[in-house]
Every structure is written in structure tokens, then in C-alpha cells.
Amino acid sequence: MKVTEKDVAYVADLANLELTPGESGRMAADLNSILDHMDKLNQLDTAGVEPMAEAVSAFSASAAGDRFAYAQRADEVHPGLDRAAALANAPDTDGICFRVPKVIER
Amino acid sequence: MNLDLLTIEEARGLVQSREVSATALTEAHLARIAEKDGEIGAFLTVTREPALAKAAAIDRLAEKGDPLPPLAGVPVALKDVLMTRGVRTTAGSKFLDHFVAPYDATAVSRLEAAGAISLGKLNCDEFAMGSSNENSAFKPVRNPRDTTRVPGGSSGGAAAAVAAGFAVATLGSDTGGSIRQPAAFCGVVGMLPTYGRVSRYGLIAFASSLDHVGPLTRTVKDAALLLEVIAGRDAQDSTSADVPVAAYSAECGRDVKGLRIGIPREYFAEGLDAEIRAAIERKLDALRGLGCEIVSVSLPHTEYAIPVYYIVATAEASANLARFDGVRYTSRAEHAKTLAEMYRLSRSEGFGAEVKRRILLGTYVLSAGYYDAYYRKAQQVRTLLTRDFQNVFTNVDAVITPVTPTAAFKLGEKTGDPMEMYLSDIYTVTANLVGVPGISLPCGTNKEGLPLGIQILGKHFDEATVLRLAHAVEQVK
């Protein structure tokens, strides 16, 4: 067993999830089964192989060789979502801001 | 006249000639949804009134005799991960049950501008995570070809809607096969454009380096016609490429003589259903007859694609789904006393089991002590998978493979073991990791009458060759 229920609880805390005891046991079993399969990657020697985060920069480099030229644009102001539209789906607002339970406990 | 299984050209032709009004065409499709979708479950939201208003506007244009836009009057529907202004958009999740999108996805606004009529939003696995559509928080989708079987996923509703005659074409999303696999299971065409070919603005993100928007249609030419409309640079998506959009539909019918087609050995190894293998071999024989050269090639890292995919996809998902927190657009857990408690309880109530599993896995592979062993390792093997394709594409114009190891499986058959479900994605995930375009199209049926699929993969931004070859495969018997 790679992943214990304690590990699951630690990861769940990082991810802001709270699991029931039943969920926690099931998740530990599932993660172990999945990670066992992922260990297959250790068969490969990847020393010196460049990690790849995304495919687009491989073929979108500028003539000057700038990998991220495609993502650059003029620094111009454009209208965004207006306030009413941005707040329309919120569970709680005061009409100006999103409202949440208190952040700092005494 | 039977209006159930029209192509785009047929539908548009009827509206342009005023043989059938856009209103009548829309009504006919809405009636079919009302009659049959109770059994299939493809739709989460039907937008009857806006669809009829749009149809009336198209009819007014047609009455004037003006040339109509390219998709005028064509009934379409949209996977519910695409934002639709003023229309509920759920991503198949209870967490977004009441979310009404404040703007349109670019692919959606381009379809609308081309005159298409959206009938509503389509069921899918929650946040597009699944291969059977059984992870929808609302209801499963059933395969119209056999309702005891799954339609595939995660664009199960999008494939089922085309197969069942609810819409002429649909838009789906594909992160690891979510357009191509359901297309194969339901007997329709599904296209994965090159990474960067179609804007993802307004697509609810699952794994941003792997997510694509693409069409599901009845014919290859319809996929080409839709792609012409939705493809191209969009200032709202910095990952959309500034590469000219070809006249893809003009490729359909062009001669395929002299094309070199690679058959990767690793995709025809153990685990592939014998009837799928035989069906693909029949198509390859026919292509030889048309003057294509079929050559055996190797993509040696294929067996590592599933672990790479499920590390990269879950890592990205764990970051992307952090935004769903009970503050701005999701539902919120009641009775939380502090902000931290509100985040935790809202997310725990809002997300379903598979989404939680992937967030946990993604968080684990990114966490201190495991990052190098899993995430960085997977990114390195992603480079090796990409080199495999670069090597093969120096020698061939396209690659042909299966889409799935088996035909559509039964509901409940794979829900007990997530790893078994993940392994069914073996032939589709690599295209997303590498960013190449692909298409899944029907390849006959098996003894039980279930549809089988065949996949064509091409070079980056060479959708033209993929579609040209796909059209030839579609035409040969």
C-alpha cells in the first residue's frame, strides 16, 4: 500500500475537500490501484529528456525563436464583464461585492 | 419528408430553397427530442423559445431570397461544458446546477453567427471526466443504437443526439478521447482539431494543455463544414493559433492516391477486439485499391500514454477546479461558519465521486515529494510520445488506428473499477498529449449490430489531409 487513509486525508486537506470515512477508504484503494499502474513510467530512463507542459509552443515559435510569441498582445484596455453580470450567479452578494462567511476567527 | 437524419448541406438546402422552413425544421427536431429523449437522456436543457425565435429570423432572411450564412437553419446542440449566454450551463455537475452563463463560448458564437440554431445543452460526464457518461450528476445517457449500453463519454449526450436524430450536428469537447470515443460507440463522426485550431474561450476547463472543442456529425463533410466555421485565431484565447483556416469541405472527395498511411503496430496488439481489427483491415484493403500506400510503423511509447495522461490531466484538473469554491458561481454549503469551512463543505457537497478522485490524484502527483516522481516524469514521457509522432510523420501523411478496444459496453459494466475505465482510453489519449488532429468515423458494425470506429491522426494543423482521407474511408464499403 503506497497511499494510506492518512495520506488521503492530507491530500484532501490540500484540495479543500472533506471526505466521509467511507469515501476515504474507497479513495485510498482507488489511488493505490491507479498509482500502481503509473509506476510503469519508471521502466523508462528519462534522464536529459526535456519536460513538455503543452503542445502549442512547439509549433508557434516566432521567427526570432520566441516560444511564447503567440501569447503576446498589445497592452490595450478592453471592457470586461460588468458588475451585475459578474455577481448574478453568486450565492451571496451585497450588490457590489461577493459576500462570504467571516475570514478571521477571534 | 423524413427530417430526422439530414446532413448539414441537406438541412441548409431545404431552408434556402424554402422547401422546408427553418421553423418547421426546428419544430420537427424539438418534437423528436420531446418524444424520444426521455429514453436517451441526451439533453440537460432544451432552449425551445430562443431556437424558434432564431429560426423565424432565418426564415425572414430566406424569404427575401438573400444568400444564407453557411449553417443557416441547421439544428445543433452543445455539450454543457460550453458557455451559452443567458442559458443554464452545468458541466454535468450539481455544483453548477443553477449557473447561467454570462457570455458565449467563441465556438458557440461562431456557430450562431453562421446561422445555426441551438436546441439546447447536452448531457456529459461531470466536468467532462469520464468515458461512459455515467458520471453525469443528473442522469446517464443511453446509447441510441442499444439502450442497455453506454454512449461513451464524456461527450455522450453530443454523440447520442446526432445518432438519435435530435440535432444535425453537435459540439463536444475532447481532453483524452471525449469526442472520438462516443462518436465510435454511437456510430457517428467526431473530430479532434489540432491543439490551438479552435478557441477554447468559454469552455469550462478540465485540463488546459489537453482540452479541445470539436464537432460531432453524421458525415465527414459535415465535420469539415463545422470546422470551417469554428476554427481560427481568437483574441480571447491566447492558445488559439494564428494559422490560416483551409477550405476543409473542399478536401472531401479529393483523390487520395499516393497518400502514405502508417499503421502503428502498438495499436493493433493484444487487447484489441477481433471484429474491430477485421473491420479496419477491410478499410485498409479498400484504401490500397484507391492507390494509398499502407506501411507498418512504430510508436514505441504507446503503452505509457495512459499513465502519462492520467497524471497530466488530473494535475491540471486539480488546479483548474480550485476555482469552484462556493463564492462566485457555484452553489454554497449552508451552515458553514468560516470561509475555510465554507470552501471545504461546498466543494465536498458539489463535486461527484469521480471528480473528487481526480482532484485528489492530481493534488497527490503535484504534492511535495511526489512532483518529480510523477508529474515531472509524465511531462518527460510526454516529450517521448511527441517524438514518436514526429518520427513517424517524417515518413507518412497520416496514421490509422482503432478508436476503442471494444464496442460500446453495458451501463454499470466498468463503474466498479476506475482503472479499468481509464484503460479503455488507450487509443485516444496520445493525440491530446501530442496535440495532433484526429477523427473518429464509423467502420461498420459487429455481429451484435453495434457500431465500430476507425481513427485517423494527422500532422499538426493538417486537418485537410485527415478529412480528405476520412472522406475516402467513409465512401468505400
Image: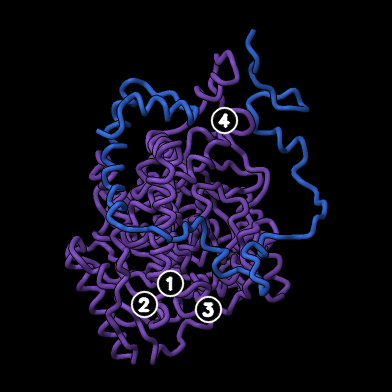
Chain colours: A blue, B purple
Q: Dot 4 corresponds to which residue?
A: B325
The x, y position of residue B100, in whole percent, is 62, 39
Q: Which residue is mark 3?
A: B249
Indicate which label's residue lies in the foreground, 3 or 1. 3
As drawn, B208 above or below B268 = above
Q: Pointer 2: what residue?
A: B474
Which quadrant holds residue B439? bottom left
**Dot 3 or dot 4, earlier in sequence:** 3
Task: Determine contact: label 3, label 2, CB under 8 Å.
Answer: no
Q: Earlier in the sequence, mark 4 or mark 1?
A: 1
Q: Is residue B307 left or right of residue A62?
A: left
Q: Secondary structure at mark 2?
A: helix
**Residue A67 coordinates in the image, percent (x, y):** 62, 64
Write the residue at 57% across / 34% down.
B98
Three-letter amino acid code at the position of disc 3 = Ser
Spatial CA distance of label 3 from label 2 is 14 Å
Q: CA distance from mark 3 to mark 4?
A: 43 Å
Which of the two discs, 3 and 4, sits closer to the camera? Answer: 4
Q: Where does label 1 land, which residue?
A: B219
- The C terminus of chain B - image quarter: bottom left
Image position of B280 with respect to B294: above or below: above
| Mark pair 4, 1: CA separation | 41 Å
Q: CA distance from mark 4 to mark 2?
A: 46 Å
Structural crowding at the residue carrying mark 1, measured as other residues with C-alpha within 10 Å and reported as few (<14), some (14–19) or many (≥20): many
Identified by mark 2, the residue type is Glu
Whole-number angstrom distance, CA of label 3 to CA of label 1: 11 Å
Kindly indicate whether the residues beneath marks 3 and 4 are on one polypeptide chain.
Answer: yes
